[in-house]
Amino acid sequence: MKVLFGIILALHSYILPVHYEVSLAGNFGEPRPHHFHGGIDIRTSGVEGKPIYTIGDGYVSRVSVGLYGFGNAVYVHHPDGRTSVYCHLKSFSSRIKRAVRHWQHLHQSYRGDMFFAPTDLPVAQGDFIALSGNTGHSMAPHLHLEIHDSKTWNMLDPLEFLGQYVSDNTAPVAHGLMAYPQNGSGSFCGSGKQQNFAFAAQSLAHKFTAWGQVGFGIWANDYMENSYNHYGVRSTQLMMDGKLIFESNVDEIPMEKTRMADAWGDYAHFLRSNVWYMKSFIEPGVSLPVLKSGKKSGIVDFTEERDYHFTYVLTDFFGNSAKYSFVVMGKKEKIEGKLSVQPMKTLFWNRPNYFVQNGASLLTRSGALSKNLTMKPRFLVGKSSFFSDAYQFYPVSFPLFSWAKLGIKVKKEVKNPEKLYVTSLDKSNRFFPSRYEEGWVYCRIRDLGLTYTLAYDDLPPSIVPVAYTNWTQTRKIKLTLHDKGGSGIKSVKAFLDGRFILLEPLGKSAVLQCDLGESPVPRTGQVRTLRVVAVDNCGNENVFETKLKY
């Protein structure tokens, strides 16, 4: 009988959220850009509309619509101190939908975070709560299921509670080894640069050489039978000469540390190859509780001219395990000189940093980086279409663990400086909520590698009716919005004879629709006044009015 990680499954009383055999498209803890995958993805046969049921007793404590990339999501608080979250839903049960509609009309907003008391929407295990869908940041129809500790909001592996319903007899597979000679203190195969090698077999025949301090990383995936998907590896152990020097066990991840996926994983290599190498050492600013190592944080110090024997042990949630080994010969080698530190351009991981140069300022918090970083700032003299110079602090994407404060000096006089905002030249229509103050515009950023500049928006958004001649016949109002100034749409509200009616996205299209049959306005056959108000992120407003018979 295979040994399972964590709590014994038999002690849990949760059931599946679907009434069919489960196949996973994603598992818990997979590294993703800027976060870990916080749950499991349950396939829905490539279609929407599968019934979704509560995995346990409790009450609906929260519903989010159009937020966090979840699309439509239902949160169920359970009496055992956990909360299950069901995401990318197409629609809600009638009871939940009524509560959502009440909130939306009360707050005159389609998007929102809605919280409920224990007596508002109680549910029993197996109650129908929604239909599966493809809303939010979902690339295909599926159910994303998360389980959190209700008090700490730490993400828990749903397989700890539902693993008995999933079949897996396939061990993880390693694809590559990465060596990381430490700057100025290590050499691997005669070089101070990081190097990767393919695992053509479970034992690498090539004998490597090293001297000084070197870290290692591994590219590995878990697999399941009857699936083409690959998954994150639950447990990784690195042994040296039979002794454990590094271990990861991805069972529980604090939400506030999920961005550390970029630092445990080799984010720079991922940008180039779309492949995650996970480091088997811990950088000083990384405090993920799923990682453990000895005093040297997993870094190996090659100080003896002998063979060092290494073994990786990869294990999935179900106990399927595989071993991969390699040998490194300690050999005195020339170690490349340490790169000189430039204090004025260095961000230190363990203290706040303040950088000011050429009309830009940057303030980072202590703990925003995994290690010290020497910036390579680049300043582009302002173009005629922008209102400042452009600034980049690092040549490629470099995400931070927490928000940094960016300031940009205004170089072009404008009619209303409150309409200035920070944008990114790397991504079209990228708006950063900004604040003007004494000739500077300030915002929060989380990536040092984007190119930032100022833009100006004093143009109201446009409101374009879609199939206007059919509105009376179909009783469905359809329109699209476009923000000509570039800051993006902040809100849109529609009113019929002064009463709020709800506009919601039509699938993943740019069309907004109101089904008048579901609105609080009764049909009388009279001519009504429709008023739509759209506001962009710089506060510019446009009003569209028309008459229709309803």
Image: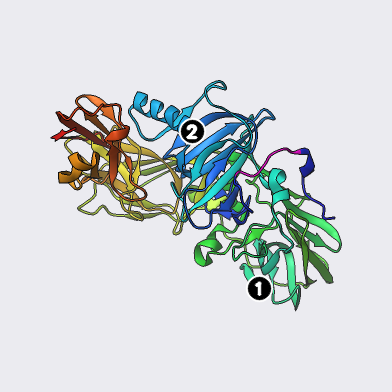
Q: Which residue is mark 2?
A: 63
Q: Looking at this view, name the residue that lies furthest to the bottom.
A: 205
> In the rendered image, which quarter contains the C terminus?
top left
Callout 1 amino acid: Phe
Q: How is the image coloured?
A: rainbow
Residue 482 x/y as whole percent: 23, 46
Relative depth, front residue between 155 and 524: 524
Rendering quarter of residue 77: top right
Circle 1 packing at 10 Å, graded few (<14), some (14-19), many (20+), is: some
484 in the magenta segment: no
Q: Is residue 412 left or right of residue 1?
A: left
Q: Main secondary structure of the magenta part?
A: loop
Residue 440 x/y as whole percent: 31, 37
Q: Which residues are magenta?
A: 12-17
Q: Is residue 410 left or right of residue 331?
A: left
Label 1 sits on a secondary structure element that is strand
In this rendering, does residue 265 appear at all? Answer: yes
Circle 2 packing at 10 Å, graded few (<14), some (14-19), many (20+), is: many
Q: Which mark is residue 77?
A: none
**Residue for point 51% across, 48% down:** 50
Residue 241 x/y as whole percent: 85, 64
**Residue for point 57% across, 22% down:** 118
Residue 196 x/y as whole percent: 63, 70
Callout 2 amino acid: Val
Q: CA distance from mark 2 to mark 1?
A: 47 Å
Q: Earlier in the sequence, mark 2 or mark 1?
A: 2
Q: How many marks?
A: 2
Q: Which residue is mark 1?
A: 197
